[in-house]
Image: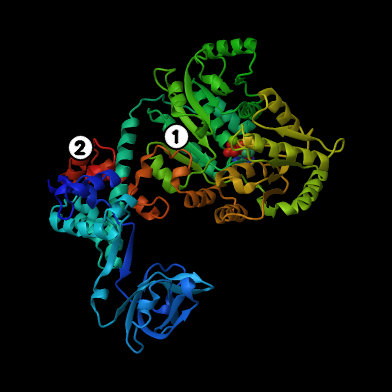
Amino acid sequence: MILETSIEYLKGVGPQRAELFKRELNIHTFRDLLAYFPFRYVDKSHFVPIAQINSDTTYVLLKGHFTKIETIGVGAKARMVAHFADESGSIELVWFKGIKWLKDKFQFGKEYIIFGKPSLFNRSYNIPHPDVDLAEDEKVVKEAFHPLYNTSETMKNRGLNSKAISKVMQNLMIQVEHQIPEVLPPSIIAKYRLVSREKAFMDIHFPKNTEDLKRAQNRLKFEELFFLQLTILREKVHKHKTPGHVFTHVGDAFNRFYNENLPFQLTGAQQRVIKEIRKDLGNGIQMNRLLQGDVGSGKTLVALMCMLIAIDNGFQACIMAPTEILATQHYKSIAKFLQGLDIEVALLTGSTKTSERKIIHEDLQSGKLKILIGTHALIESAVVFQNLGLVVIDEQHRFGVEQRSKMWQKNKIPPHILVMTATPIPRTLAMTLYGDLDVSVIDELPPNRKPIQTFHRYDNARLNVFAFMRKQIEEGRQVYVIYPLINESDKLELKDLMDGYDSITREFPLPKFAVSIVHGQMKSDAKDYEMQRFAKGETQIMVATTVIEVGVDVPNASVMVIENAERFGLSQLHQLRGRVGRGASHSYCILMTKDKLSSDAIQRIGTMVRTSNGFEIAEADLKLRGPGDLQGTQQSGALDLKIADLVKDESIIRAARDTAMELIQRDPQFREPENIHIKTFFEQNRLKSYWAKIS
Ligand code: ADP
Ligand code: MG
């Protein structure tokens, strides 16, 4: 096949340039080069009226005439400014070099075509060093769109710049014409009115106009996402074959809890999610479900009700939490929910006494103990369940997949797995990343939640913030003050925290006030002790690092002050803010920053002030940081996307996903003749990158 031909044999390349292509861009064959897309295009297809130039403008083509040409300054600092006008307005063209030669070159009264990149200077646009041609010279305009390719310094030094690559690409186009096979079935092409694969590849490099370019991009993005989704969905179909326990019965445990103990109505979202999970639990296949919900959305309750279903079917259940504090909290709230129902619950952590541990081990094996809540201690080999039916994992990102599979190995038929996370993942990303995991979303908070008001304050307003804290404390509320400690062993940051603690204890002295402190370098007993004091209301202020980020519930705390807020990421700020707003009273989040902020920080803080919707924040985070930094995406194929964009191409992602889903359901083995290329793709699926596989 011609696409396999080594790049060396392409006209204009040869052995030496081929070496460069291979070494610098990992381009070995015609196919590799074909998939080396331009990063941008210069549009010379039409003239832009000068008045329409704005901050979005990149390169422009103008048509008009010179009205004035002057030289400003002398010697090395001299510049030539030419005033250029069309019917809509005028703009300055500026040269800092070659002035002598240029000065008398332009003629007044003749029409010129200008090509260049406007930049903003003193609130108006000028174009430094533009290309200038007489309008009579038609060839300039004929060039229309042309592609810009990334190249390396080494390549440029050896004459392989963007223009040279473009030339080589043109040669390639002549070679491969009529040799680029279609891979999508005709029905899909027709449904989405996609251009042919060949036309898409031609146009992505040399579009004649914006429409052609758009259609080429759409087609290639769709193709890329479609095959990604097919791959993910095929794995999912495969995975779902693992048999699971069948929980058909809803009995005493569930019903009595629901009718007698549940102190409030479930939200609509909770009801929906419980239904989704119940369906999973009844179909004989092991459940692997991700439960997403903003902080405070009531995930724990959903988990509890699922555990009760397991118990009603004669099984045990457990919850694994990432920290001792969290595990303890789950234990307490669940024990309280279950009061009077005669269902045994126990807590197992690293600090559980040996004597207690022994009893827990025995009761687990005899089946007397129904619900076990704990930390990593749950996966120690001494912990043996009689019949574990459901595992709930809280705050998924703290546990690796390895730990998850360890839980599975404990039984012949693996327990169902429910992973809870409060880190909302944008839907497009979830669709792409967790195609292999089912996702349930609690997208509604319980009623009566007062929204948290968020403010941004600069460090110089600290006294006002102290005054505000004092007022809240005098009204009986409690306050968190959080310091960033990105690296727990960083001495400087720890010093920040200790300094902050000192100034707060001075501002809020004993005996009227009491201040707690918690950070990662304290012993776990000491941390717990301080947390408990704060939870019981014995201290009014909790000075802490992000160790309190996840899950701690002190409903009486109504103010969250975050110091150096510019140093936190959006999702972390959101998690922290979720620590307040859990009680009945008004809650506040105050983001303290230094005066001078990067534009990135300004956007982050602005987002926090504007919204408290976790999904909106996650989307904003994705836009600001790109998917590469989001938790859990590091090893995902989603990052290898070559042309599609997880942020901007949401509608294409949906279309690709729906289409892939429909295809997998209708023709899972790709037996229909029109799916032959898809079948071939999966049969030959040995290489890693999609674009290497597919062409
Ligand atoms: P999450 O774990 O999702 O952050 P929690 O499960 O800790 O949220 O719930 C937060 C609080 O809201 C808890 O005190 C819980 O009892 C309460 N809660 C849960 N569901 C409801 C509901 N439907 N109505 C009122 N309060 C609820
Ligand atoms: Mg929780």
Q: Label 1 amino acid?
A: Arg
Can see residue 265?
no
Q: Position of residue 215 (x, y in %)?
A: 28, 61
Q: Secondary structure at mark 2?
A: loop
Residue 455's place in the image compared with 104, above or below, is above
* 61 sits to left or right of 443: left
First-in-chain label (1 vs 2): 1
- Quadrant for ligand 1 reads top right
In the rendered image, the residue lying farthest to the front is 75
Q: Nearer the viewer, residue 146 or 428?
A: 146
In the rendered image, the residue lying farthest to the bottom is 109
Q: Position of residue 339 (x, y in %)?
A: 66, 26
Residue 596's place in the image compared with 632, above or below, is below
* 509 sits to left or right of 56: right
Answer few, some or many: residues within 10 Å of disc 2's Cα (few below 14, many 20 plus, some between 14 and 19): few
In the rendered image, the residue lying farthest to the right is 511
* 163 sits to left or right of 83: left
Query: Hey, which quadrant is residue 649 in on the image?
Result: bottom left
Q: Label 2 amino acid?
A: Gln
What residue is shown with label 2? 684
Q: Quadrant of the N terminus?
A: top left
Which numbered disc, 1 or 2, marks the residue closer to the eye? 2
What residue is shown with label 1? 289
* 149 sits to left or right of 573: left
Question: Is label 2's Cβ within 8 Å of ligand 1?
Answer: no
Can see residue 682?
yes
Residue 445's place in the image compared with 291, above or below, is below
